[in-house]
Every structure is written in structure tokens, then in C-alpha cells.
Amino acid sequence: MADGAVGFERKFSGQFVGRVFAEVEGALAQSLLRAGIDVKAPREEISVEQFAQGLSLYSRSRFPELSVSEGMRRVGFETVRRSKGKYDGKTLDEALSISASALSRVGPFLEPQVHAHGERHYVAHFDDVAYLHTFFLGLLEGVTSSTQPNVKVKWSPEGLSGARYDVTFS
């Protein structure tokens, strides 16, 4: 669905979609296919709305005992943790920089920015997370969990559909 006010459709890269749904198979893969997401051969791009619908199905299936938003957070965390040590040995600053750069390629509409706000505090701004704020919270928790102990990530809404993620450590 095109956004008339901005003049573009928000889409995620198919490669990213493939990574998020990499472990899906069987009946869930068929449900996702009916929702327009082919987990075995993702399209070049997928709309945010389709991705959110698929992520909701996956979250409910993967974590039936949790709320959908908490399930989305856990899927985000697991997606990063499956990246086989990509962030291991990196400083928090390096890991946040790498993740912001990667996310700008995944969905350019996100426009992620990370800034240091003191010695133990970083702030990440995402322009448009739609209603996937807990999924991105999980992604950032996954990124930061490899860097050092005692890292906390909190999110708060920013504007109409943006989010602010405060990353602190002790």
C-alpha cells in the first residue's frame, strides 16, 4: 500500500525476510506462503504490512505462551543471535554502528541513527518502525548482548511511527 503523504511504499529486503524466517517449515511455512511470504524463496522486497502479518503468525507459533509483541521481540533477538558471532568481540559502539548500517539497507525507510550520549549511553532513532517496535527492540538486544555484560535497551515512541531506543550499560 503506497503512502500518499510520503510517496513511497515501505518494504523490507527479501534477504532480510529470509533471515528472519530461516527456521520456518511445515504448516507454518504454508501459512506464511498464503500470507504472501515464501520462506524458501523470498521475493526481492516485501511490504512492511506483509512482513508484520508474517511476523505475527511466526511469533504466535514460536512463542504461543507469550503476547504477540513479546514474541516479536524474541524473534528479533533470535534473528541476530543466529548470525554466528557477527557482533562478538565488537565494542558496543562498533556493534551499534554495524547494525544501523545494516538496517538502513534492510529497510531504507527506517533511517536508523545512533549517537553517543555520554560514556555509557547510546540512543538509536528509527524514523518509521510502524508497529514493529518490539521486533526492533529484540534486534538491538541481540546486537548488544554480544558486546559486554549488563547492557540494557529500552524503547519509547517517537513521533507518529518512530522509536527511540536507549542503550545503557554499567
Image: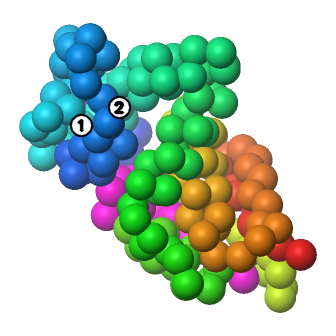
Residue under label 2, please give it: 51
The amino acid pointed to by label 1 is Ile
Residue 96 rendering spot, x and y as whole percentages: 57, 74
In the rendered image, the vertical position of residue 124 relative to residue 92, given as above or below:
above
The amino acid pointed to by label 2 is Phe
Give left or right: position of 114 versus 56: right
Q: Secondary structure at mark 2?
A: helix
Residue 76 rendering spot, x and y as whole percentages: 51, 45
User: Which of the pair 21/43 is nearer the observer?
Assistant: 21
Q: Residue 116 lies in what quarter of the image?
A: bottom right
User: Which of the pair 157/120 is nearer the observer?
Assistant: 120
Check if residue 83 falls in the magenta segment: no
Q: Residue 2 lies in what quarter of the image?
A: top left
In the rendered image, the vertical position of residue 29 relative to residue 48, given as above or below:
above
Give left or right: position of 74 versus 103: right
The residue shown at (35%, 31%) is 51
Q: Which residues are magenta?
A: 103-116
Give left or right: position of 106 versus 52: left
The residue shown at (66%, 20%) is 66
In the rendered image, the vertical position of residue 169 relative to residue 24, given as above or below:
below
The residue shown at (31%, 64%) is 105
The residue shown at (42%, 72%) is 86
Q: Is residue 129 visible?
A: no
Q: Earlier in the sequence, mark 2 or mark 1?
A: 1
Q: How is the image coloured?
A: rainbow
Inter-mark Cα distance, 2 to 1: 7 Å
Q: Is residue 100 visible?
A: yes
Residue under label 1, please give it: 46
Q: Within 10 Å of the Cα at label 2, are there few (<14), some (14-19), or many (20+) other Cα atoms?
A: many
Give left or right: position of 47 versus 141: left
Q: Within 10 Å of the Cα at label 1, are there few (<14), some (14-19), or many (20+) other Cα atoms?
A: many
Say whether marks 2 and 1 touch (CB < 8 Å).
yes
